[in-house]
Image (spheres, rainbow, N blue to C red):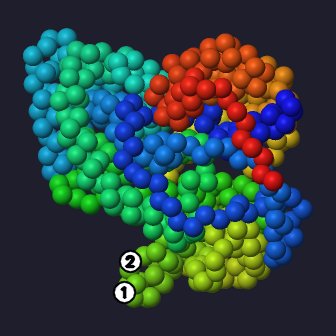
Amino acid sequence: MLIAAMFALAADLCLAQDQGQAAPDSGQSQPATEQPQPQDQSPSTPETQEAPKQPQTVPQPKPTAPAAPSNQPSVQLDTSETLFTVLTAMNVCGYDDELGPSDPLREQIRGEVSQAVQQSEQAKETSTAMCLLYDQHRQPDASKTLAQYVSLALYLNAPPALTPKVKDADLPPDAARLTGALPLIQRFYEKAALHEIWQRHRLAYSALTARYHEPLHKMLFDTEVYLKFPSAVYLGRQFTVYIDAMGAPGQTNARNYASDYYVVVSPGKNSSLKVEQIRHTYLHYLLDPLALKYPATMKRLEPLLASVKSAPMDESFKGDVSLLVTECFIRGIEARLTGSTKTPEAERQQAVENSMQQGFILTRYFYDALLQFEKDPAGLRNAYGDLVSNIDLGKEQRRTRQIQFASTADPELLHLSRPVGGKLLIAAEQRLSAGDTASAQKLAQQALQENIEDQGRALFILAQVATMNRDMQGARSYFQRALEVAQEPKVVAWSHIYLGRIFDLQEDREAALGHYRAALNAGAALPEAKAAAERGIQQPYEPPSRPQ
């Protein structure tokens, strides 16, 4: 009985495993998007012994977990007091980029903060010291100055704490160099009464999210219908768009933290939502996990990397063929979706050509291959394997030799917000997402033994592996050890949730309730964790029924 239940719990964890990976969370979660519902497709089969250009085998049915509650979507349009605080501090210290075309709310808040500073000697003293540090870290390009503070804000606990949610060593490099300013930002938040100013403008911020709700929903719906691939299949992963009035309206910042994706945008005067930039990140959110399921194909395509050494694109694409393939795929989709049905084909062809000249040499292949995909009923999850397996390596190498690379490339919007030193656990999480528990276990154990990365995350991954292997005692032990050392809210919250479920399966309701309550405290700012903890308190966990 317990073995069958553990099998079901493992399936439940497989669907939601990424929720336990540490990631930034919002200070105020107010979802403003509805979940689109295009045609769903069954998942494609990850390659084991790959046979290119042959049909993929149909996977064996797996137990499925209950769907996430409808009031906890995986896609959110949100605001954050943490972002507001950090960006407001920048404005106090001379961040004036694109002030003229910004939403009037930015100028209004700047005036109120300036008045608050003038009325408090302590706020004056704090702002002077804070701005000295700001000047030391100011970049020649204002967009890069904004980018590093966005990275920092996404890794902070909500005010008034404003402390890092991870160890300094685990912060992305651009955020790590700013941690010395945190005590001053914390003190400025208090002395300038930023919370009161934030509260005064909550309705205005809500109006901003309401303004952009419909265009965001339409973009999501249109994208998922085109790909025949609903994001709802990715339980436990999050895509969040933050709106904040205090940044430059011409700038968009996107971050990927493990399985969670974030876009930060600022409104301009009567400006529309930056749909193309947000869609680019959303396509990464949908496609990034698929590339991990076909390692043999990616290995076969590695010779393409030699062809792009002199291309002007970011160096990351020249060292990882899966990144290159995914970016080319996304650019092919974007070219297909350019404009409307009345858009001249020449305009789409020019977009493809521009992408190829920047080094994204498979854009032409994917653009052409998507013509047939559009006619077939199969969704992207089913079609992805054939689309990448059918790439003719020799043909693409010959085509690349005919390309005259441009001197510059568009800057890549999405940044991987993980420290350079976190490669073992990043790889472990990727292998776990792909169902390769043996590799995930090996990488997590290596990180644990070498003590060079987050020990709580390493133990949580090992707990996930044990659960997927139906080792209930091992899972319980690793989850408990993770709680002893973990600092990140998601790891703490989901360790408690899964321990609660294990104790429910063992009919120890009192112990289970203790863990659900602890998860509720730890995951107060994490919508899906909070919902899971509340369900556990309301009734004992019951594993989902296995399909007949």
Q: Residue at x 64, y 22 (%)?
A: 496
Q: Nearer the viewer, residue 467 or 435?
A: 467
Looking at the image, is 490 positioned above or below residue 253?
Answer: above
Across the whole image, how many numbered discs are drawn on residues? 2
The quadrant of the rendering that contains the N terminus is top right
- Tell me where residue 368 sits by quadrant: bottom right
Q: Please tell me whether mark 2 sits on a helix, a strand or a loop.
A: loop
Q: Residue tagged by mark 1?
A: 342
Q: Nearer the viewer, residue 209 or 333?
A: 209
Q: Please tell me whether mark 1 sits on a helix, a strand or a loop.
A: loop
Residue 356 image point, x, y percent:
55, 75
Residue 287 image point, x, y percent:
61, 59
Q: Residue at x 52, y 32 (%)?
A: 531
Q: Residue tagged by mark 2?
A: 339
- Tell me where residue 393 sits by quadrant: bottom right
Looking at the image, is 304 positioned above or below residue 542?
Answer: below
Looking at the image, is 60 positioned above or below residue 71?
Answer: below
Q: Which mark is residue 436?
A: none
Indicate the amino acid at tag 1. Lys
Q: Residue at x 87, y 70 (%)?
A: 51
Q: Are marks 2 and 1 in contact (CB under 8 Å)?
A: yes
Q: Is residue 257 visible?
A: yes
Q: Is residue 304 visible?
A: no
Q: Residue at x 44, y 88 (%)?
A: 345
Looking at the image, residue 187 sits to the left or right of residue 76; the answer is left
Q: Nearer the viewer, residue 361 or 32?
A: 32
Looking at the image, residue 81 sits to the left or right of residue 330; the answer is left
